Amino acid sequence: MKKLFISALAIAATAIIVPVSQNSTAIGAGSIPDFSTLLTDCGANGGAKPCYYPDSGNTDSGSAYLGECSNSITDFCFTATVNNEPAPSNFKIVATVSAYKTHTPSESIAGYEIFLHAFALPAGNTLNGDYWGSSDRPRDQGTYGGVAGGVVDLSGVTINGRALNQTDTIKVVVKYKTSGLPQYSVVVSEDGTMDFSMNGQDMTLTLEGKPARVAIEAASQHITLDPNSTFDPATLAANKCGLPNMRFVACNVNQAESNPLAFYARSKSFINSPGADVPGPIWVSTNATYFHFPNVEYDNATKKYVMRVKTGAPHFLADGTTLHTGSFSAFLPNGILSQWKIEKTEAALKTALAVSITKNDVSTEATPTFIIGELGVRVKFPQISYSAPVLAVGQAPATAAAATTTTAVAATTTTSPAVVAVTKTLRKGASSSLTSLIRPSGKGKATWRATGGCRVSGTKLVAPTKAGKCTLTLSQAKYLKTPASRRSINITVK
């Protein structure tokens, strides 16, 4: 199980990091908790939680399995309630926090990721540590020692003599240690919320919402993830659903095999650039079966930032006639709003934010509801439907007059690099993937050039061993209707 968890962490983070900060800050070694010294080994203590599993397949990696909070257990633990009452005995949580390559400065996806899954526990079953990974089909726990575990459908939970339903509110408060506020998080819940409170290394994560109706395809229809594939959505075989790789969520399954009530979440804190440069916490709530973490991108064509979330689920519920409607909301923290130069007022948000839903390459503008809070703004989308919509919220395009001016200026400066107002950070002597620093646009031939002491080595940018500044430039040739382009960013070497 620990091996599955670490693999899920590495896969989940591969292609979601597009930093947006102008001032990056590297996290010092003193801010990086070491689970192996804070917790006892799960194998040595008989699996009593909380405990630590080292990862046999990776050095500098492992997983903390969290237990229920009590008078004697106050960290690496959780407390669950339903309708503000202690959760019933047949409502169970499996919570784990992975530490992946946390002391490896050259690893771009290094960090801490929490996975939390709620299960119903039928009479006679025993909860175990099993759960599905980020790209897996949601499923019941496996059988261990001849005894079945928890089941994903929470309608099996009994509340005062009745079955739990979509009007009940689940709340889980999780306490653990991590390196900093998470950059990206997702909770699968109906109208779910996430709250993060941090003191030093101590994180308190609060999840609250109603169980979501999640549509699940048959096992034979599930797409097995291949993170190295060159997936083309146009070639997707009929009746398939899932994450083909870390660029797409795909689903053209018409009818779900099952549609249980579910509640689960993921949250990731990156340690190194570029992921650590993103102002967090950005989080979304959805009932999508499959999803990627939010992806904040700089659109070189519009000169605007946009956050996109790719989702997927079967079109109809298991009865074959009920449309599987979707819920989605996104939280933009103050740091993002500040970077986007958007005031936190209803009038400013309506003017400055653009919200859209894209299905089958057709984008439709959406009218959201804004919930303004002390730490940021929650953007609630109108009802959506599946199979694979891409939800986006970002800076609104310029007005017609401004766009005309921008076009005229661009026409006079096509031979100069377009320097994006982003500064990224590399540690002295460290390296980072070129495409994680500047994401190529389209399929035009890419040429990379570094100045100021950094150098391009294969597919990576290598920083010098002395502190300083350098520039990375990506030039792309014209491809079909995509024009040639040139983009540059600044690199601070610390």
Image (cartoon, rainbow, N blue to C red):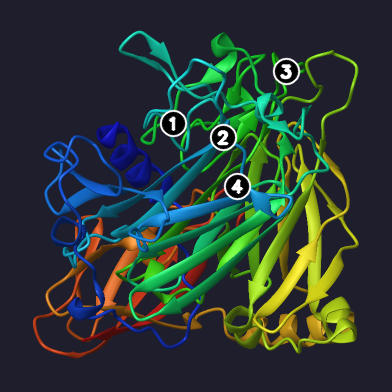
Q: Are the residues tagged 4 and 2 within 8 Å (C-beta)?
A: no
Label 2 or label 1, whichever comes before in sequence order? 2
Q: Nearer the viewer, mark 2 or mark 3?
A: 2
> Marks 1 and 3, Cα distance to the nearest angstrom?
21 Å
Q: Dot 4, how many residues are within 10 Å of its Cα: few (below 14), some (14-19), or many (20+)?
A: few
Q: For mark 2, what is the residue?
A: 89
| SS of the residue under disc 4 | loop
Q: Which mark is residue 256?
A: 3
Label 2 element class: loop
For the residues labelled 4 and 3, say whether their Cβ atoms are less than 8 Å apart: no
Alpha carbons under labels 2 and 1: distance apart: 19 Å
Which residue type carries mark 2? Ser
Q: Is residue 398 left or right of residue 258?
A: right
Q: Which residue is mark 1?
A: 131
- Quarter of the rendering containing residue 448: bottom left
Within 10 Å of the Cα at label 1, are there few (<14), some (14-19), or many (20+) other Cα atoms?
many
Judged from this view, the residue extending furthest toward the left is 465
Q: Residues within 10 Å of mark 3 (few under 14, many from 20)?
A: many
Tell me whether circle 1 and circle 3 mark residues in contact (CB < 8 Å): no
Position of 363 relative to 296 (above/below): above
Please say if 92 is above or below 171.
above
In this view, the mark in front (4 or 3): 3
Dot 1 or dot 4: first in sequence order is 1
* Point 58% across, 30% down: residue: 90
Residue 52, image x, y percentages: 22, 48
